Image (tube, coloured by chain):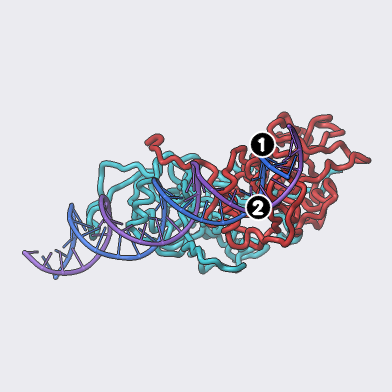
Chain colours: A red, B cyan, C blue, D purple
DNA sequence: ACCCGATAGCCTCACGCCGACGAGAAGGCG
DNA sequence: CGCCTTCTCGTCGGCGTGAGGCTATCGGGT
């Protein structure tokens, strides 16, 4: 009566911005199949565990941080991947999860497999269908920066407007006018909360430090395409 | 080594607009658990079937229409639901799928279980966690109307601007100014393609008939909230 | 000490989209 | 023929955004 049985795994697309470039956390597989290939970190769902629990547990295990519910960081479900044959070992359904983190050091390679953040642009040839999951995660992140305040999830607890702008520029691979960007984000109620401190040691005028505000949505959204009203096709 | 095994099902949130009201397709369960409760239509994933295949198959079986890839209609993945205990029979992961259809008659109740489109507002107490899946699907549909041309998926192949506006009003439960709406949708390149025919028999000036255009995104999006720029907090 | 480049932050202007609304066009109905 | 309804086009003002000028304030070089 039931359909076939699946093993259910959770694979993480952990994104961060490092050196003004979008990076993704990958692990080098130490076992077959796809031995010594890069892959998204992940693991199987345990008994009495919900999908989000598995994702949070794997994320904490890979990064050593408890990002779930914290002010910084973000974790959300991406989608399910269950194409027949995606895993040569048998029928495996993988739930993709998207995590956005501030720039943290690469995890220590002590007893586990090698793990590192790599620039997203350089990544291809991942194990299984992880190329597809990664592409979906990156696209989701790009889209969400448009109409949410999630860019702050890439930033440390306190950050400057320029830090935030560099996140947008890295994720979207575009350039944004600093002055208009500043007007946009500082005029959105609840996006940024100014702190009393400023940053010294930089090269220019000391910038203001901000914290994440309670706002989650951007109305109206931040447009990434230079909306050309030229009639394209018809 | 593998985690526990799951049965994997696909549950459909099939939405349509009938009588200017958002409706969802439900089936009355004829077996335990939740016997005689309303539930989302769905079924288990077969061997050698991908999730989307299962969703399309179930959708065709329930509605008798092949909406996949057709000009009208829309089918997309919603998310995975796998909370422990969501199915008393054991560990079941359900992939929610969202389908948007033009108004079609209720499926014939011949040999299968009773199926009918019910107004979304009146629906509660569904089997399993289907209330949550339904709520997620409705919210997804509402959000997607903002920045995509998916509203046309609720319409027959040829429709008027008013038909399209009533879709927005039904899904968002708002009222939209017909003149501004007309300007917006007709000035978006590739959204609507005018046909040569007009509709007669109505009560006012005969409206123009349109077909869906190739455009899928709305730039800039259609805003549903009356964006009040009054400085709220801070 | 001084200048200069770089960054942060504020301001102005122009253009385009949108909400509010008026008015004409084109049909049905009594 | 009036009258109502609905479709369609136009107008006006406000707001957000792109473009860009300008000042403040640092580090670093001469």
User: Which residue lies at the image location 71% right of the left edge and 30% below the top edge?
Assistant: A122
Secondary structure beneath label 1 = helix
Residue drawn at x 32%, y 57% is B179
Q: Residue at x 83, y 41 (%)?
A: A106
Residue wearing tag 2: A150
In the image, A146: left or right of B159? right
Q: Nearer the viewer, residue B4 or A105?
A: A105
The chain carrying label 2 is: A
The count of marks equals 2
Look at the image and tell me whether residue B60 can be seen: no
Q: Nearer the viewer, residue B111 or A209?
A: A209
User: SS for tag 2?
Assistant: helix
**Residue A127 position in % (x across, y down):** 75, 33
| Discs 2 and 1 lie in a common subunit | yes
State the image quarter where residue B124 is shown: bottom right
Q: Earlier in the sequence, mark 2 or mark 1?
A: 1
Is residue D7 shown left or right of residue B218? left
Relative placement, left or right, of A95 versus A146 is right
**B17 lies above or below A86:** below
Q: Which residue is mark 1?
A: A132
Q: Is residue A220 left or right of residue B87?
A: left
Rendered view: A124 above or below A137: above
Query: Callout 1: 10 Å neighbours few (<14), some, many (20+)?
Result: few
Observer-nearest of A94 and B146: B146
């Amino acid at each position: 009566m039931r359909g076939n049985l699946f093993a259910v795994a959770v694979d993480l697309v952990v994104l961060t911005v490092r050196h003004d470039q979008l990076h993704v956390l990958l692990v080098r597989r130490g076992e077959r199949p796809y031995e010594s290939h890069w892959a998204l970190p992940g693991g199987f769902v345990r008994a009495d565990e919900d999908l989000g629990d598995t994702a949070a547990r794997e994320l904490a295990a890979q990064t050593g941080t408890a990002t779930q519910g914290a002010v910084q960081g973000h974790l959300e479900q991406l989608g399910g991947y269950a194409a027949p044959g995606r895993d040569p070992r048998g029928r495996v359904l993988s739930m993709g999860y998207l995590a956005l983190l501030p720039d943290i050091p690469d995890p220590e390679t002590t007893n586990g497999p090698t793990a590192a953040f790599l620039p997203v642009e350089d990544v291809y040839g991942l194990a299984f269908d992880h190329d597809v999951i990664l592409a979906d995660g990156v696209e989701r992140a790009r889209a969400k920066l448009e109409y949410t305040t999630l860019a702050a999830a890439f930033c440390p607890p306190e950050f400057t407007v320029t830090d935030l702008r560099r996140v947008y520029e890295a994720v979207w691979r575009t350039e944004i006018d600093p002055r208009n960007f500043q007007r946009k984000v500082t005029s959105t109620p609840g996006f940024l909360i100014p702190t009393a401190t400023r940053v010294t040691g930089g090269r220019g005028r000391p910038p203001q430090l901000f914290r994440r505000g309670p706002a989650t949505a951007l109305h109206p959204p931040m447009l990434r395409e230079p909306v050309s009203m030229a009639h394209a096709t018809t």
